[in-house]
Amino acid sequence: MRILHTSDWHIGRTFHGNQTMDALAEVLDALVTQVAENAVDVVVVAGDVFDSATPSGPAYTLLSDALLALHETGARVIVTSGNHDSAARLGFQARLLRDGIHVLTDPAEVGVPVTIDDEHGPVHFFGIPYLEPAIVRAHWPAAGEGGGPLRTQAQTMSHAMSLVREGMAAHEGRSVAIAHCFAVGVESTVGLEREVRQGGLDMVPLDVFDGPDYVALGHIHGRNRLSDRVRYAGAPLHYSFGEQSKPRGSWLVELDADGLVTVEWLPLPVPRALVTLTGTLEEILSADNVAAHADDWVCAVYTDALPQTEPMRRLRESFPFCAMVQHQPAVGAEASERTYSERLRAAVTDTDRIEAFLEHVRGGQGATPRESELIREVLDDRVRAEALV
């Protein structure tokens, strides 16, 4: 059996204020082509299908189009809900979907598999929707530590996987688990994977996933291999400049009669590349940069000592898809060695104090000659005004 593992489509998400629906549709079309070309039997979507709990009409349309296109290849499709999805909204039409498309959103059904046969017999797919402990306590009131309530996602996922193993024991054959969580050892994108909490409370130990032949995980937007049989596919589209170096694609998983045989990475196209350009504004706007990146999403980090006038407007004249601009002035050696308070203590005159302030806020760059002239004029005017009082 051939299984395509994908996740985190985030239909409806924007990229720095720009809609991504058309780009995602292009990538999902390529994914459908891969499913057909590789004779995939089952497509697994491991959560975060939508980016919002209240998806728009066009988001539903894109999902329906993608699911139907996958179904028309002859593949079965199994979808679970993630933390961005509303399980109720994602699953409301599950019973109306045609045979071969399964949307799994009910925690009470975690141990009940979707069974698909191949020439070697049955393969049991156990879908685990995103499980927020505070929400699923009512389903499993005594499943936490010492028979108490569930408090962490590690406890919640551990209980869910125990139900999966009970289901495996009751259904002979190979098995695949599908889950949406943050596992220990995964490399995440800083500032991107929302709902990842501090202190390890939501980090699920790898051994929790012992048992199935393959575990298809979602939630992390970059490709991650935790073991041969436990992996994240990541998102099919870049949604942050922090992801720009991470490949986009999905895992092609093959099972034989005895279980897992191979796992192969299938890359997906990137509709528009992401690049971060660093240097002075003049350097960023160089002819070489413009020639190389005029059609890319650009994050410009300019290092001029002083903030520049209308940098975004100037950048977009050369880079129409500049989505982000940051001012990060280079810090001089003296600025890094002397604190602001030290410079103030060393100041004798008002001119010295103003210079210390400018060096502090400009990363070591003091007043320009013209600014120094203006400062002297202002201070002289103040002295003359005080003399008249």
Image (spheres, rainbow, N blue to C red):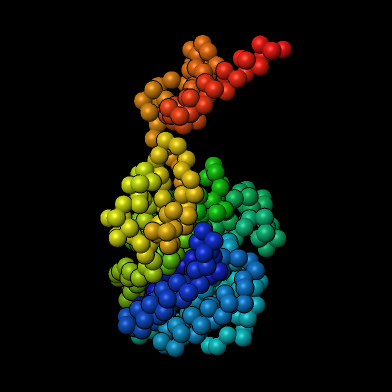
Q: Residue at x 39, y 22 (%)?
A: 334
The residue at the point 50 percent across, 61 percent down is 15
Along the line of sight, which residue is nearer the eye, 144 or 11?
11
Horizontally, residue 138 falls left or right of residue 67, namely right
Residue at (42%, 84%) from the top-left corner?
Answer: 75
Q: Position of residue 282 (x, y in %)?
A: 35, 46
Residue under the image location 55 percent in, 58 percent down: 157
Image check: 386 left or right of 308? right
Name the quadrant of the N terminus: bottom left
Q: So how many labels did they put on this image?
A: 0
Residue 303 lies in quadrant? top left
38 or 108, which lies in front?
Answer: 38
Q: Can residue 57 be seen in this view?
A: yes
Q: Quadrant of residue 336?
A: top left
Report whether 250 appears left or right of 112: left
Q: Residue furthest left?
A: 288
Relative to 238, residue 186 above or below: above
Q: Is residue 263 visible?
A: no
> How far from the left and from the top, in percent, is residue 276?
38, 52
Q: Is residue 303 above or below residue 49?
A: above
Q: Where is residue 343 in the image (x, y as percent from the top left)?
A: 48, 17
Q: Quadrant of the C terminus?
A: top right
Q: Measured from the top left, where is residue 197 in percent x and y?
A: 56, 47
